[in-house]
Structures are given as structure tokens and as C-alpha cells.
Image (tube, rainbow, N blue to C red):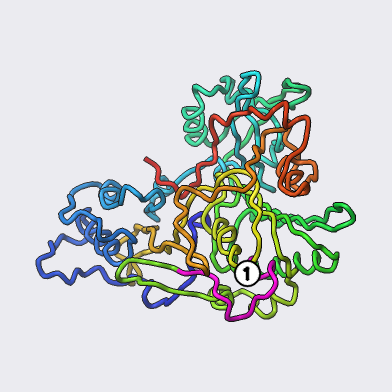
Amino acid sequence: MKSFLKLQCIAAAVFLISCTNNNDESAPVFPEGSTEFVNLWVQDSMKRYYYWADEMPAKPDYQLPVKDFFKSLLSPKDRFSFMVNTEDSSSYPRSIRNMYGFDYTIVQLANNEVVTVVKLVLQNSPAFNAGLERGMIITKVNGKVMTAANAEAMASFIKDQTVVELTVGKWQNGSVTDEKNITVYYGFSFEQPVLSKVFEKNGKKVGYMYIYDFPDGMTQTLYQKFGELKAAGVKELILDLRYNYGGSVSSAAALCSLIPSGLSSGSPFIIFKGNKNGGEVKRTFAQQIAYDPKALDFTTLRANALGLQKVFILTSNSTASAAEIVVNNLKPYMQVIQIGDTTLGKDMAGFVVEDKRKPRKISWQIHPVIYKVFNASGAGEYSSGISPQSNVNEFAGLPLLPLGDPNETLISSALNGGYFKSADHEKNGNIKILFQSDVPPVMMEK
């Protein structure tokens, strides 16, 4: 899944599980196809790869349902490992974003009024096609009023549906106007485009780039976009990762290679630290980028590098995984000015563990935490998130403006050097976030 931080093959032969035999002669033997047989395979796989393998129970209950057995192996420190049955679509994590293509936040205003704000609508998603827009206010779902008290129940309800009717309006002068009903159907959202713009600030050109995620094969797009910014004479860069759950580490490395000055093909990019089997793996920018077989090489990418000394990065608590790697791993090479909210805190990487035998005997896939990640200076351990230097509430000025608008709250703050100076900020500075719909889909569903 794209939302689970991918680690491109460090050594493909090590990563592919094709055997379920337990080398321990005293290990139990279960009939093929039984729940116990699957659970033993899960245990063997986790012993080999799981970051917290040494904390797993010595005598788990093999009779538990597979998902419950898997959960019984997990460390209390693990928020992110999950597993799915490829033959059962209901076993996959669900989110409003990946089902309908939008996210919302319930906020309490300075006057204690509670409103539900649409903060993200994916391009060419069911929500987009239904007419939903960033900045709209949701007042009802299927005729029921949205409140802070019913927020979690309402989010669960939406995820249990295949079609929802939203009553939405616009925020104008402190109230909701132009209410209307729109119907959003469950469906597929297409790959999101990279948005780039050039702003003028005090005679200096500032580049802006909004990156929704890090899919494989995006180096050509990054190369093109940075080429355009370089040709425009950009001297500063605002990187918007506020809703970026992550994706491919190789794509994140490619992005990082295009921003600072002074990099060479041998410049260290990342350190992966695993269990006693995984050990420690160090990768340069060039090496990590090359794990994407479709990627442009490091030298080619560097031809369009901006060569900057500092970068502004916009974050929220939806910024996760590979997006957090961008924030952390640029720090050894340039000044990173982080604006917005503390990130999610996924300082780890993993890859899919599955049965590679032919014919396949087990249909389950495990998505375990396998490595903790660190930058070239050895800095990591940000499981509580990476805190911004400038803490700015995205909802400090309603209505929310489109991403890429220079007057939008976080962008305006970056253009002002990290400070948000506005009458709206003073008026709405006491806004509190009560609930957010975008719990990353990699989070284990309970």
C-alpha cells in the first residue's frame, strides 16, 4: 500500500519469504490450511523481520484468529504494523480519504462555536467529482448534524457506507451560507499531481511545491518541476507536505537531492536500523534513489538542483513516514524551517512480507515495522513527531484558502519568514482542533 512507508529492496533475496518451515525441531506442526498453520507462519516471519522481535511472547496462542494472533505479537510501542488477507477486501484498513477522496477537521472557534471544515479534496476523486471543495463546511451527514460529541461515531459510519450525502456550505463572515446537499459515492482516486508555483517576495522569487505522496517512479516529475523552478530563478523554496502520508523512500531521497547545495553521489542519506537479523544498513542519496528501477539517476537529478541553503517545510500531524524522512534527513545539509504542526511520528520503515511459494499456500500479507530510520548525522527517534520551529494553526484563518494560494495560512507564514501576521490570526488564534478524519490508513484498526 502506498500509505505504508516502502523500503525498496536492500537485498531482494533477503526480503522475499518463500518458506514457512520453522527450524526449531520442537516447534509445533499444524495441518496445512489451518488457522494454526497460518499463525505459525506469521510468528516465523515476525521473528525474522520484526523490529521488536525480541519482545514477542514466547508461547503465543496459535488458536487465535489470525488478526488477533498477529496483534498478540506486537510491541506496545508499535502503532503501525498491520496485516491484510489478499482474498478478503474487508481486511484492508479503511479511511475516508482512500474511500471517498476527502478529509475534514472539526474545530472549535474562539467563540466556542464548533464547525466541520473540509481541508483536503483529492483531484479526480469521488468527492472532487461531486463538487466538494477545500474550505467548505460540512453541517450534516445523511441528514444528521455533525458535532464534536458524535465525531468518531460519524467517521465510522461514513467508512461503513458506499455512498454518503453531505450538507455543505461556505464560511463567510463567521457563519455558514449557501448550504446545499451533495452525494459522494465510494470510489477510486487517481494519482495526485505535484503542484508547483512561483511567488514574488520583496523582489525575490520563491518556489512552492505541494507533494501529496511519494509513489514509485516520480523522479521524472520532480526533475521537470525543479527544472522549471530553477529556470524561473527561484531563490527560496516552500515544500508543502502537510497531508503527505509517505510512500517510497527512494522518491523521498530524489526530492531531497534536488534542494540543497554541496551534495555528491557519495553523500550519506539514511541509516536503517533493524533487529539482530536486519542489522544496520547505510545508504547514500545515489544508492537509495537507485532502488526505484524507474528512477532517474542521482547525477541527472542534480542537474536541476536548486542549491539552496534553507528550505521551508509545511507540516501537520498527517505528515508521516517518507515525508518525515524529508524533514529529518535534509537537516544535515541545510537549514530546515518547519512551519505548521508536529508530524505524526512514524520514524520507521518496512516492506511487505508474503508467501512467495508457487502455488501460494497463505494469502495473508504482513506489513511490519522492520527498521527505525535515522539521518546522515544519526538523528532519529522522533516517534512523538517532529515539532515545527513555527507552530501555526492551519485553521487560524477561515475560510481555508486553496493550496497554492499565497494568502493561505501556512504559505503566508512561510512567505513571512515563518511568522503569520494577520488580523484573522489574532481573531481566530484560539481555534482548537477537536477531531480529524485523516487517521493514516496504516494505523492498525482495532
How many numbered tags mark residues here?
A: 1
Mark 1 residue crowding within 10 angstroms, few (<14) / some (14–19) / many (20+): many
Residue 437 is covered by the magenta coloring: no
Identify the residue position indicated by label 1 in the image.
Answer: 254
- Which region of the structure is painted magenta? 254-271
| Residue 405 picture location, percent across and down | 79, 45
* Residue occupying the point 60% across, 35% down: 104
- Above or below: residue 106 compared with residue 123: above
* Residue occupying the point 54% across, 41% down: 438
Left or right of residue 234: residue 214: left
Q: Secondary structure at mark 1?
A: helix
Q: Quadrant of residue 392?
A: top right
Image quadrant holding the C terminus, namely top left
* Residue occupying the point 56% across, 64% down: 329
Furthest toward the left, the residue is 26
Question: Is residue 71 in view from this perspective?
Answer: yes
